Image (tube, coloured by chain):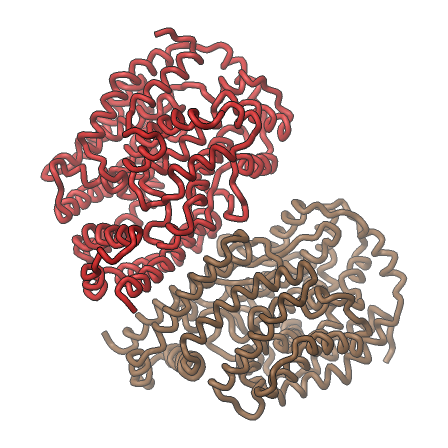
Chain colours: A red, B brown
Amino acid sequence: MDKMEKLKEYIKVDAAYNHALALLSWDLETEAAKNSVSGISETIEVLSSLQYKNLVNDEFKNLLYSIDENSLSELDKKVVSELKKSVFEKLSKIPEKKYSKYNSLLSESQAVWEEAKNTNNYEIFKPYLKEIIMTTKEFIKYRGYNKNPYNVLLDDFEDELTVKKADEFFEKVKKDLVPFAKKVLDIENKEILKAKEKLNMKFDIQKQKELAYELSRIMGFDFNMGVLKESEHPFTTNMNNKDVRFTTHYYENDVFSSFYSITHEVGHAIYEAQISDEVDNTKVLAGGSTMGIHEAQSRFTENVITKHKAFMKTVVRLLEKYFDLKLTENEAYLLVNEVKKQYIRTEADELTYPIHVLIRYEIEKEIFSDLESVVDVEYIKNLWNDMYEKYLGIRPRNDSEGILQDSHWSAGLFGYFPSYAIGSAYASQMYEALTKVVDVNKALENEDFTEINKFLKEKIHKYGASKGPSFLIKSVSGEDFNPDYYINYLKDKFSKIYGIKE
Amino acid sequence: MDKMEKLKEYIKVDAAYNHALALLSWDLETEAAKNSVSGISETIEVLSSLQYKNLVNDEFKNLLYSIDENSLSELDKKVVSELKKSVFEKLSKIPEKKYSKYNSLLSESQAVWEEAKNTNNYEIFKPYLKEIIMTTKEFIKYRGYNKNPYNVLLDDFEDELTVKKADEFFEKVKKDLVPFAKKVLDIENKEILKAKEKLNMKFDIQKQKELAYELSRIMGFDFNMGVLKESEHPFTTNMNNKDVRFTTHYYENDVFSSFYSITHEVGHAIYEAQISDEVDNTKVLAGGSTMGIHEAQSRFTENVITKHKAFMKTVVRLLEKYFDLKLTENEAYLLVNEVKKQYIRTEADELTYPIHVLIRYEIEKEIFSDLESVVDVEYIKNLWNDMYEKYLGIRPRNDSEGILQDSHWSAGLFGYFPSYAIGSAYASQMYEALTKVVDVNKALENEDFTEINKFLKEKIHKYGASKGPSFLIKSVSGEDFNPDYYINYLKDKFSKIYGIKE
């Protein structure tokens, strides 16, 4: 066996652990009974530790670093460099004991955060948040950093993203979108208020489920390749490119909640399902590229596509078919694009969404730009509330709708949030490029996503994680990332809806 | 760390693999999409091989065989002897590569069998069945056997069961039940025919689902400990005693199919859920005892209990509640106990059921009594059909209702079937003992299973796999196994229903 073949034996084992762990999490989120949780956590812990030992050992390290890269295919080269980066330049620099202690801290903190959120009790979560932040700072020291320590965390979720680049992006959000959103938020759109009254009804859950399947199929999701189920928080996961799973949740009084959860998650799901077999087979490069690229796909389908004027024919048709609800296309368009003063990021409209992210970015940057200071979690909470007041004109009435709303920090996911907004910006640039080769209006009016999905597959999806965002954005648009597309797209769309003249 | 503690580290890893593998199979059977099957099979193959390597190695073997058993608790002693038996007297004799290849053959064959059954196409399943049988024969050679090779397979599912003992049992079935059943099958019960007309209606699937949950709860299943789902072939599985899962299937034109699938699987499920934590924590002795003991629990709840005259009040109540169907208790009793010429074992009545098993036993005995002959799967199919004609007076009209009906052989489960009939016989002996201490009529009329479940827990369930059938049958009844209880129970019950005087 040559060295690359030997390497692939390790990868095969790693992939089997990944599959089992992904399925255990899927099970935990979607159907496991209450009393089963601790048994599942125990198995996750044992398998995670076995997975760690499979790769983090001298034998594997020697093998990996002794491979002659010149003899390899491009894809195998990328596999090797990805493994060096993810296993030995990241994971292995942290002492194993600290790492596993941190992991058990995280699983404890998830439960505490949930309780804190449900009972509006930030006090009980504070010591956990503090310890997670301080451990993350400690880990940055182990891992080393360039210029700003926060760069390490940004790069974890969005390759090559730095504070410098993120600052440029969020400066535009602050300068252009914040004042524009404020203007929009002050307008009372009477047409929307009137249309909203029609939504004051019950939407049968069984019917919503049927709608969810039809909608997913319209968007091109093939249920031979995956599963749709329910969970507390909608998400997408995948075992491989032929086993992609996503969830939604149904509310009897809010049909659009599930509707747009579906169109969001189907964006993720089709991305995973369209990764080429060649890339999927490497296992290491399977799955999507960065978080930003992934969010670009989901926010593209959710906002740019299924909140598009030309898709309203379908929205109207489906609401009439399943609920006998009669809306005009214009009413539907106004309703799904309503801009609201909203405390909760995940329920935010397309326009104010990046402002929610801006707030989290500024807080994280302040925390992690300095590794030596001890975080003051009471101060962080006040900062959160002050920023909501400053940027969105609303002050959270309690911590559950304030700093406790997201699960990310309790899971140690710092550096993750910016990718949501940057993903949205990628989506606008993707759209601009798409309109040059595909008649989007016609495609949507015909409920035919074939050309759209084909375009995304060729330009982005098929590459999986074998390419980074700069390559993919250039591949899809012919240009480097340019956030102006995003700013212009939002201002243009919402100026029209709210009758604002520049 | 002392040796037993070290041993427990291995067991912990083994249990994590078991959990992951059980979940992967559960997933495969209940929700995985068509195209996901091969990816799941691949992961099952890798994890099975890792699991094998974890225990089948010199280090573990030396540890296991060097433990001073005198220093151990009774339970730990049993753990050690169980591991010696299952790992080194069984598993390790089969070369690892053959073992994992066989496992992936099995997961592939499941899908092929399903298609074969659905499209009535035995041809596509033939090569799989042949290879599974020939591999099983090969494995028996590796494992070695005493007297009849088929003994090895019988013992896999029912400790200490041999062809000699099974022959004695099935001779009674042949001698006493076959002629009695023929007599019953020749009687036209007009009351039943009349009552049957009332069942000629559609039973809404959604309502059947709701009924399934209520029925499971009445029987004492706690949904904090598990999950009910749908699958082609109803089954029960468990991750541990706090995570027990079972399935059913719903037919719009047959309400009793799901009804009695539920009462069968809940019998299995409550058994698993009532195993003591002490035994469950050993992992090695977790889960039920033999298959015969397991089937005893499920056929006890299905036939003896929920087809009992005193349970008819509940049957009538539920059918009226969910489907507005009005039956008298007597009509219900006759309907659920109707003896029919039936092709499908799982739909068979209580009386002819052991005859379906007898047929499978005779076929398997013929196949595995001789390891050298190459199986002729066309001949086996004809044998199947001939025996149905001989023992039940019916000849399957196609293979879907003939040899393709059961999933067992496609899963390599040879030696399993006899335990169904022997389990039914155990159940009659359990019932005889139960009636001495619990007022069964009163309990069922009150829909209160507390005393029944408590009795089963104390006498059988709590022991899990730490005790074998001879101990458990004596524990529950104070006697050794005696199949006469079964023969008498059946003849007595059905003589009354069909007005037969001996």
On the rendered structure, is B463 left or right of A50? right
Q: Which quadrant is the C terminus of chain A positioned in? A: top left
Q: Which quadrant is the N terminus of chain A positioned in? A: bottom left
Q: Which residue is drawn at 29% across and 43% down?
A: A411
Residue A125: x and y in percent read: 27, 40
Look at the picture and state if B262 lies above or below B502: above
Residue A100: x and y in percent read: 24, 55
Residue B248: x and y in percent read: 62, 57
Q: Nearer the viewer, residue A77 or B228?
A: A77
**Quadrant of res A282:** bottom left
Q: Which residue is drawn at 88% across and 70% down?
A: B187
**Quadrant of res B155:** bottom right
Look at the picture and state if B377 lies above or below A188: below
On the rendered structure, is B170 left or right of A352? right
Q: Which of B374 and A312 is in front in this view?
A: B374
**Quadrant of res A212:** top right
Look at the picture and state if B172 lies above or below A222: below
